[in-house]
Amino acid sequence: MPFYTYRAREPEKSCDYCRDSFEIFQKIKDDSLEICPDCGNEVVKIMHPTVQVKDDSTNKLLSDDNLKKHGFKKLVNAGGGKFDEVV
């Protein structure tokens, strides 16, 4: 289950628990919290940016050098039903 972060909509009317922010475990299918579980004031969900990781492992596995090192042949379509051997 992921963590979700919430904070008070109006910090001046909130308790110490929700004033800055708080985290809570919730299922993805659960509805977002609308009130603070401690004081009952209105809260909003804070969205955090995510990091995208580019996976280059496939490119390295299928590189010409790696294919040649492991004894594979690489054929490239030359057109007209003909293929040229690259590695």
Image: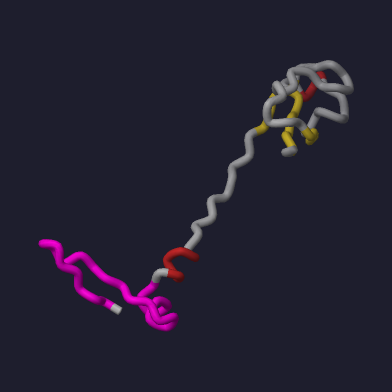
Point out the residue furthest to the left here: 80
The residue depicted at 50 percent of the width and 59 percent of the height is: 55
The residue depicted at 72 percent of the width and 24 percent of the height is: 30
The residue depicted at 42 percent of the width and 66 percent of the height is: 59
Residue 63 picture location, percent across and down: 39, 72
Residue 21 horizontal side relative to residue 48, left or right? right
The residue depicted at 63 percent of the width and 34 percent of the height is: 47
Q: Work out whether residue 41 or residue 30 is closer to the camera in this orientation and state it.
A: 30
Q: Image height check: is 1 above or below 60? A: above
Q: Image height check: is 79 above or below 68? A: above
Residue 54 is inside the magenta segment: no
Residue 8: quadrant of the picture: top right
Label count reads 0
Highlighted magenta segment, given as a residue range: 63-86
Residue 36 picture location, percent across and down: 82, 21
Quarter of the image where the N terminus is located: top right
Residue 70 horizontal side relative to residue 11, left or right? left
